[in-house]
Amino acid sequence: MGTSRHARDDWQVEEAYLGLQVIDVESGRKVTGLDGEAKAIGTTLDGAYLLLDDWDGRVWWTEVFDR
């Protein structure tokens, strides 16, 4: 995320989404990757699903991925 000031003294916010990488902690190797945009990342309580939450200014939605 970056910000810049415009001529009228208002701020512009720019976001760049880099995707998500899943890394095996023991080996340090990349397991998988996901392209996408998310404002928040979480898991279900049992850890079975990855949750990516996003917002378009009007509506929130969640993408659900299994392990």
Image: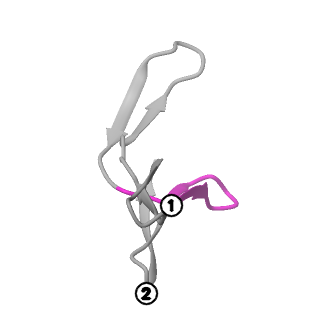
Q: Are marks 1 and 2 in contact (CB under 8 Å)?
A: no
Farthest right residue in view: 45
Asked whether 38 falls inside the magenta stretch, the response is yes
Q: Amino acid at mark 1?
A: Lys
* Label 1, label 2: how far apart the Cα atoms are: 14 Å
Q: Residue pushed farthest left?
A: 35
Residue 15, relative to residue 62: is it above or below? above
| Residue drawn at (40%, 28%) of the image | 31
Residue furthest top as drawn = 27
Q: State left or right for residue 44 relative to residue 38.
A: right
Does 14 appear above or below 33? below
Residue position for label 2: 58
* Residue drawn at 44 percent across, 85 percent down: 59
- Residue plotted at (50% across, 60% down): 39
Local secondary structure at mark 1: loop
**Does 26 lie within the magenta span?**
no
Specify the amino acid type for callout 2.
Answer: Arg
Q: Residue at x 63, y 61 (%)?
A: 44
Front-most of residues 8 and 29: 8
Q: Earlier in the sequence, mark 1 or mark 2?
A: 1
Colour convention of the picture: one colour
Which residues lie in the magenta part?
37-51
**What is the number of the mark on residue 39?**
1
